[in-house]
Image (cartoon, grey):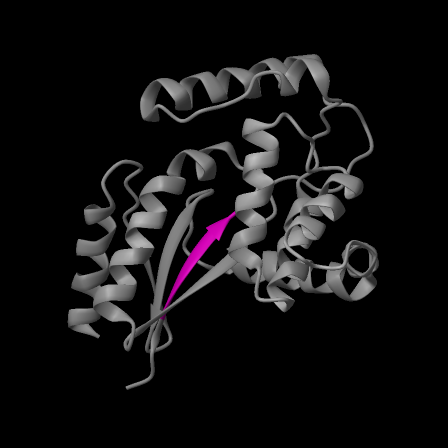
Amino acid sequence: MAKATLYYVHDPMCSWCWGYRPTWDMLQQQLQREFAEQLDVTYLVGGLAPDSAEPMPESMQQMLEQTWRNINEKLSTEFNHDFWRNSKPRRSTYPACRATLVARQYGQEQAMVNAIQHAYYLHAQNPSDVEVLSTLAGSLAINAEQFKLQLLSEQTEQQLQKEIHFARQLPIQGFPSLVLVANNHAYPIKLDYQQWQTSLADIKAVLAKV
């Protein structure tokens, strides 16, 4: 039987994805132990906010900072609130999404997502900025200038739009979402921010019946 695929639909600048990160890491480790021969895990960028050069409205900044506080309260996730005072926020996550697609070509997709999240949430850097993303690429031993050319290329933009379109055809409920595709059928998987066992049980149930 063909391998099933578990899609992790996310955005590198989605704060709930950052909150889910420890649980997702545990789930991936368990899946690798139990289902390496049956299941592929694939990241999909869903594209939270299109390109924009406009400063983020003050009201949105306050709303998002409050979201960070809510996530911290519920999940104990660490956030550096200096971002809201020291950066120039823009409602633009597509550059970070493109960065993960370029890094995928170098086998560094998950490392790039991790680097973006750490830069954004812990070090108060702005991953909406190409220079920040290029610096992160350099930290992953990807040539920063070559990375920047790829990041801004029409080919990468087309890849992003194709991936966003595909992600939106899946039965997702925002970001992050998990969808298991087996035998050409897409099954939404329960996502629990604190208990990876919830998703694992759902995945097992689907695999048992396909």
Residue 52 seen in the figure: yes
Rendered residue at 28%/76% (across/down)? 38
Identify the residue at image location x=24%, y=65%: 33
Residue 112 part of the magenta-drawn span: no
Give the image quarter of residue 182: bottom left
- Name above or below for residue 61 compared with residue 95: above
**What x and y, as percent, mark residue 210?**
22, 75
Q: Compared with residue 126, is residue 190 higher up or lower down, i.e. above or below?
A: below
Residue in front for this viewpoint, 20 or 50: 20
Residue sitting at the far bottom: 1
Instruction: Identify whether 92 is placed above or below 32.
Output: above
Residue nearer the viewer, 58 or 127: 127
Chief secondary structure of the magenta span? strand
- Is 138 left or right of 178, judged from the image as shown? right
In depth, the one of 165 and 112 nearer the eye is 112
Determine which quarter of the picture holds residue 92: top right
Quadrant occupied by the N terminus: bottom left
Is residue 8 found inside the magenta-colored segment of the image?
A: yes
Where are the magenta residues, as a range? 5-10
Residue 204 on image: x %, y %: 18, 63
Residue 57 can be seen in this image: no
Residue 85 image offset from top left, x and y in percent = 68, 13
Q: Nearer the viewer, residue 162 or 141?
A: 141
Relative to 84, does residue 207 appear above or below in the rendering? below
At horizontal 78% and vertical 23% (from top left) the residue drawn is 55
The mark tally for this picture is 0
Tell me the residue at 41%/55% (across/down). Answer: 171
Residue 34 drawn at (x, y percent): 21, 67
